[in-house]
Image (tube, rainbow, N blue to C red):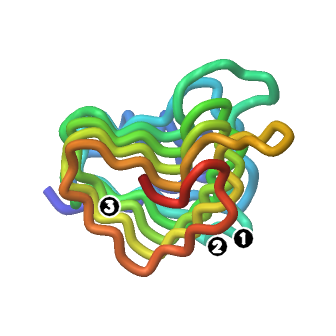
């Protein structure tokens, strides 16, 4: 079957609904706006492209205020570099902006800002992390600070042309 372009909110009201309907090879295009996610956004191993129509300047994914929970976006179903997250502002996570565990997605052209612990956390896998801006992640109290822009553990991640700015404890660890 040929790939399709699914649109949010024109075809599907929410991003999770579009991901649920998508099959390998599909592209999901998200219109400009702010999308508040009650649950972590997952690809469930699908080889799909999830991208904003107008870039991170105009399309934001975030958690609700005071929401205790996981990452805004998580890749943990063995995704490959054919699973692509492109062109979003991912902000205000109480934990991690993007989590990658035992997966190797492509994370391209996003702004990851104000995650309480880490902007992008990778544990196992070989993701492609390309042309993202990761800023103001981690927390500070007085003279002390903690947290990371990117935290890598047991990974063969490719980091190319990313901007890592003013994160709490370290830019990359």
Between marks 1 and 2, how big is the CA–CA gap?
7 Å
Place of residue 81 in the rendered image (x, y in percent of width and height, measured from the top left): 22, 59
Question: Nearer the N terminus, badge 1 or badge 3?
Answer: 1
Q: Which mark is residue 57?
A: 1
Q: Nearer the viewer, mark 1 or mark 2?
A: 1
Q: How many marks?
A: 3
Residue 100 sits in which quadrant?
Answer: top left
Q: Which mark is residue 106?
A: 3
- Residue visible at 28% across and 54% down? 105
Residue at the disc numbered 2: 54
Task: Categorize mark 2 by other alpha carbons within 10 Å: few (<14), some (14-19), many (20+).
Answer: some
Q: Disc 3, disc 2: CB below 8 Å?
A: no
Between marks 1 and 3, how big is the CA–CA gap?
20 Å
Q: Disc 1, disc 2: CB below 8 Å?
A: yes
User: Residue 121 vs residue 37: left or right?
Assistant: left
When the figure is inspected, residue 54 is found, relative to residue 3, above or below; the finding is: below
Q: Secondary structure at mark 1?
A: loop
């Amino acid at each position: 079957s040929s790939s399709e372009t699914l649109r949010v909110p024109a075809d599907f009201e929410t991003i999770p609904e579009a991901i649920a309907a998508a099959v390998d090879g599909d592209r999901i295009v998200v219109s400009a706006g702010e999308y508040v996610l009650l649950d972590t956004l997952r690809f469930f191993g699908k080889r799909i492209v999830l991208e904003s129509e107008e870039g991170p300047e105009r399309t934001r994914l975030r958690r609700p205020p005071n929401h205790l929970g996981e990452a805004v976006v998580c890749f943990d179903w063995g995704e490959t570099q054919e699973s692509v997250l492109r062109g979003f502002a991912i902000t205000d996570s109480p934990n991690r902006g993007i989590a990658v565990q035992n997966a190797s997605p492509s994370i391209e052209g996003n702004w990851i800002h104000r995650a309480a612990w880490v902007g992008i956390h990778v544990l196992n896998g070989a993701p492609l992390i390309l042309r993202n801006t990761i800023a103001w992640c981690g927390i500070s109290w007085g003279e002390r600070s903690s947290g990371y822009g990117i935290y890598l553990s047991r990974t063969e991640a490719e980091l190319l042309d990313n901007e890592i700015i003013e994160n709490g404890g370290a830019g990359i660890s």
